[in-house]
Image (spheres, coloured by chain):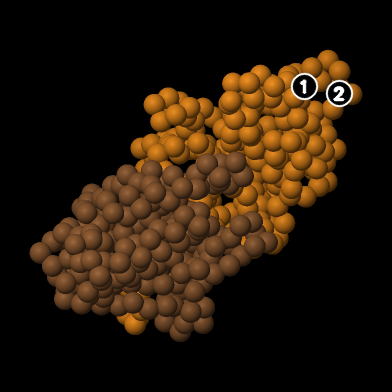
Chain colours: A brown, B orange
Amino acid sequence: MTYCVAIRLNAGLVMLADTRTNAGVDNISRYRKLHCWEVPGERAIAMMSAGNLSITQGIITRLDKQIEKSRDNPDRETILNADSMFRVAQIVGDTMREMQEQHREGMEMQGASFDATVLVGGQRKGGQCRLFLIYSAGNFIEATPDTPFFQIGEHKYGKPILDRVITPETPLEKATLAACVSMDSTLRSNLSVGMPLDLAVIKADEYCFFKQRRIEKDDEDFTALSEAWSKALNSAFHDLPHLNL
Amino acid sequence: MTYCVAIRLNAGLVMLADTRTNAGVDNISRYRKLHCWEVPGERAIAMMSAGNLSITQGIITRLDKQIEKSRDNPDRETILNADSMFRVAQIVGDTMREMQEQHREGMEMQGASFDATVLVGGQRKGGQCRLFLIYSAGNFIEATPDTPFFQIGEHKYGKPILDRVITPETPLEKATLAACVSMDSTLRSNLSVGMPLDLAVIKADEYCFFKQRRIEKDDEDFTALSEAWSKALNSAFHDLPHLNL
């Protein structure tokens, strides 16, 4: 499985993904699920994916190929020159549909799941910072102030903390912490989600990546966060008032 | 769906269930999923179920019918006279298998899911306090010091808090709080789990129910717990040290 969480705030965008893929518990691998594209000062786009790896890798390859081809033919539309983030989501959705059409029949015959979901977020100069969730059929929805975050993959373990602390007004640093705490809860409770992690942060109206880093298994900051949260949660629990339940 | 959690401690047993069932989001009902049997001073047994309601209701009805019939024929084995909790689990497993055999073919033809799981725990005089998880096939596993709790139904939201605070040494009152916090997280994040709740607590070596109560939607203690936990969680989160993530 996978766990990816993306949070769209007034202050920008936080995206965090794990790297574990598995075909059964006896076939575990590590793949990057967070991919970033940037034209510094003009746009920054980040994408995360869950589900069938051949589909999601195929999407990334096609998007990159389109960008490569557009070097010789600048009229060709790509996610790096599309005139809105909405159009970027449409391009990703169309690519999803192409991949599904190409492989669905063969995979159906094998009984393999071809489900895939993609989160794509970012900002281009002149537009807002936006976040989209793209389904297997290529259709998509957008994060709004009512629902400022999306999760894909093993989303249940890490949802309660996000439900409680995330609002559009949450600062980027706090949202990054919340994404990490949400990931930490998932890592502890589900073996199909694993380190290392990939983090990307975009500050609103800067059109570049504010942060883009891999968090390794022995990362001191993440370990400190994990321990601090564990301690805080335990003492919060043990300090609960006596209740006549 | 459903959420039920059962915790087996050195100090006894805590069992907490919600009451929501649904066949689609537009067909929501309320059913008791926690059932208790008691021979005060001799044994106390509690059972919770998730999955196909016709199967799980059928199991309860059959177990009760066996008990009724054994009044005239005391040699007849029932969960109230079986000579061990292990044997109680076997009887429940056998009843599960009978229900499955009776209805599987018909339900398969309808494409309905006949999956069901049951948690059964308790203690009889002369034995230990034990907790079992019974699968659709009638086979079962037992809670051990390594894994002192079982969850059935929508278990993921409420697992992280249990993973962090429950050990066999946890006192009954703390474990009851943990079960309620775990349920509260699930209620907040998943509409298919709903109030009221049913709680049963058995103290080790007392062979009767220490607590057995329904927690209604407007229960003051549960509301106070929910608010206290929300506040504690928020302040624990906001007090996390600044980390260079």
Image position, residue A167 (x, y; %):
24, 58
| Residue B45 can be seen, yes or no | no
Q: Name which quarter of the figure residue B236 lies in.
A: bottom left
Image position of A50 with respect to B222: above or below: below
Q: Residue beneath label 2, please? A: B76
Contact, mark 1 vs mark 2 (Cβ under 8 Å): yes
Q: Secondary structure at mark 1?
A: helix
Question: Disc 1: which chain?
Answer: B
Q: Nearer the viewer, residue B212 or A210?
A: A210
Q: Is residue B77 shown left or right of residue B182?
A: right
What residue lies at 49% left-to-right and 74% top-to-bottom?
A196
What residue lies at 31% left-to-right and 59% top-to-bottom?
A120
Dot 1 or dot 2, earlier in sequence:
1
Image position, residue B106 (x, y; %):
66, 19
Which amino acid does the dot numbered 1 rest on?
Gln
Q: Quadrant of the C terminus of chain B?
A: bottom left
Q: Residue beneath label 1, please? A: B66
What residue lies at 49% left-to-right and 33% top-to-bottom?
B19
Q: Secondary structure at mark 2?
A: loop
Q: Is residue B83 shown left or right of residue B144?
A: right
In this view, which residue lies farthest toward the top? B72
Q: Nearer the viewer, residue B115 or B196?
A: B115
In this view, which residue lies farthest toward the front? A72
In this view, which residue lies farthest toward the right? B75
